[in-house]
Each structure stands twice: as C-alpha cells, then as structure tokens.
Image (cartoon, rainbow, N blue to C red):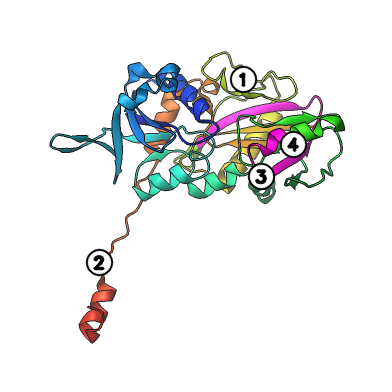
Amino acid sequence: MKFGIVFGGVSFEHEISIVSAIAVKKALKCELSFIFVDKLGDFYLINSDDMRANFFSSYKYKNSKKLHLKKGGFATHGIFGMNDLNVDCYINLIHGRDGEDGKIAGMFEFYNIAFIGPRLEASVMSFNKELTKLLAHKCAVKSLPYEMIKRGDRVKTELPFILKPARLGSSIGVSVVRDISNLDYALDVAFEFDQDILVEPFKEGIREFNLAGFKAENEFIYSFIEEPKKSDFLDFEQKYMSFSSSCAKEASIDDSLKIAIKDAFAKIYNGGNFDGALIRCDFFVLDNEVYLNEINPNPGSMANYLFTDFTSSVKKLANSIKPQKNIDIDYKFINSITSNKGKLA
C-alpha cells in the first residue's frame, strides 16, 4: 500500500509537523510520498532522501516539484499534461491549525481523496478545547471543571490552575500558575496564541495515561496504554521530541483501569464521529475515576511508539476507509422547468 504523508501547514505547529513527518518515515514501513504544505499554502512533492529538518529551514524545498490538487489526489505538471501521484491513501500529519481545525479534512472530502484523519466535524470538535469538554459531557466521560476567559476577564478558578490556549496543541502557550504574581505573565503568553483561554484547576501528582486507537470494520484496535514520565505537565519536548523513539512502555495498571480507559476512549471516538482517524486520547486518573484531558486528532508520528505493530495497524485502518459516495447531478429539474415553460433557458 502506498501512502502520501501531508505535513507542514500554516500553523504555530508547522515545525512540529516536519519533525513528525521525518519520524513517521522511519516508523511506517510502506512506500511513502511526502507532500509538504509551505507557509503560502503551496504543495511540494519532497524526495524521501530530502526529509531532513534543514531542507525545509533553508528553503531548499522550493526546488522540489509543485503539486496540484485534482479529483482523487495530487498531480504534477509534465510536458504532456498532468501526472497523477500514485498514492492509495493520504495521511493528514499537519498539527494545529489547517490540519486539525478541519481545513485539510474539508479539502480532502471536497476532492474525494481517501485519507486517514478526522473528518470535518470531528476536527472542529477536537481542535477547540471547550468543544472537547462539551463532547466529553455528551459522552458521559468525566473531565475537569473549567472556565473560559478572554483578555481582561478575571480568573475565578482557585490557585493553582493551568492556562491553555483554546485552539492549540503541543503544550504551546500553556502555563501552570501557583502564585498570583505570575498570572499576568502567564496570561500574556497564552494570549499570544489565542483570544480564548481555558482555565482548569491544576491537580498535583495526578496520574496521566495515553491511549491511541481507531475503529476498522466496527472493531476497535487499541495501542497499549502508556503512563508517561512527566514533571508538572507534558511540555513540548516531552510530547514531540521523543515521539520517534521506541522506548514507550506499557503502564503497569490493573485490568479494571485498562477497561475503564478503553471504555472512555470508545465513547469519545464514537461520540465525536472519528471514523477514519487514528487518534490519541490523554486521560487523568483521580480518585480511581477516569477523566479526559485532551484529544490528539493527529497525534505526533501517529503515536507509532504505542503500537506493537504500527505498520499493520495503519494498513488495516486505510483498508477500512470507504470511498465517498458521489451525488449524481443530471439537471432533470431545471430541464423539466425549461421544457415546460421555456422561461429559464
């Protein structure tokens, strides 16, 4: 099976997406094509040998072939016309805006392109942290209490608390506030990235667990459950600079907790209509209760480090994705009016 890895995008997480694509090159043992989206929104076909960070930071990618969208996929301009890119299924590996807010999903759906990733509605629901809270409530999955603030609002949550930009991942702009003297700086940092900030109580010593998975042919395929080592919260480096490693270990927890975490994952996946996507959910466990922390709709390197056979899992998901049904447009209605009245011709 041939996959097309779409990465980059106009996002604060643009560089994270590049690192993620480089990592997935090593993890996914298939024939891969790499489609880079630069800051202007142009598409480039990147040679596999050029998948290095400095190839992009030095703008050498601009010498690569430009790609153009067409029904069913991408193509390059050739001497005798368009040459289709030979790909069976694309993977949305753009993190943050563009990739996780629904733009890329809508583009793929509009051009009837088979892809792995959340669809438009699921993208919108998981990209906005407040909407994720509402989804969890709808699915009867617990989440921590919260408030939303804009610039100038007073924070009502008691110290200590954590500030999170509403529409950003990778722990960018996130701060833990333990002392009120640090609040103004933390707010300035958060508002650099979003006009809406989510505030949650910060729970000392809370346990966090990560679970990735997807549904194929009505069967859930789960990764193992990881309990990541962390300090206060998973920062940028912990989340993204280690996702190409194979050192993740299965959490040592009892079967009842495993079942509870998987049950919460399935409720979120089904309730959010994540069909066609491999997602990772991060959970808290507090007083033996499972709480949803966040949904990662396009997890870094697709959470390969949590699967014992990542390549087989991705192939299984790709093979389960059904083609979009076409709508037959035949203009019968307009033609019938025209033939009967002769007024709209």
**Residue 22 showing in the rendered view:** yes
Quadrant of the image containing the N terminus:
top left
Q: Are the residues at dot 4 and dot 2 in contact (C-beta closer than 8 Å)?
A: no
Asked whether residue 288 appears in the rendered view, the answer is no
Q: Which residue is mark 4?
A: 187
Above or below, comparing residue 309 to residue 9 in the picture: above
The answer to whether marks 1 and 4 mark residues whose Cβ atoms lie closer than 8 Å is no
Q: What residue is pinned by disc 2?
A: 330
SS at mark 4 in the image: helix
Of 72 and 157, which appears nearest the observer?
157
Mark 1 element type: helix
- Amino acid at pointer 4: Leu
Q: Earlier in the sequence, mark 1 or mark 3?
A: 3
Residue at 65%, 42% in the rendered image: 166
Q: Is residue 229 shown above or below 142? A: above
Q: Position of residue 50 (x, y in %)?
A: 35, 18
Dot 3 surroundings within 10 Å: few (below 14), some, or many (20 or more)?
Answer: few
Q: Secondary structure at mark 2?
A: loop
Question: Which amino acid does the dot numbered 3 rest on?
Answer: Gln
- Residue at image point 62% right, 20% down: 237
Closer to the chain start, of discs 2 and 1, is: 1
Query: Whole-percent x and y of residue 26?
Result: 42, 17
User: Can you identify the residue that label 3 sits on?
Assistant: 195
Magenta stretch: give its range.
188-214
| Nearer the camera: disc 1 or disc 3 | 3
Residue 237: which disc? 1
For this orientation, the residue located farthest to the bottom is 341
Considering only order in the chain, which callout, 2 or 3, is on the residue closer to the N terminus? 3
Please, what secondary structure does the residue beneath circle 3 have?
A: loop
Which amino acid type corresponds to the residue marked 1 in the rendered image?
A: Glu
Say few, some or many: other residues with alpha carbon within 10 Å of mark 4 (under 14 / 14 to 19 / 20 or more). many
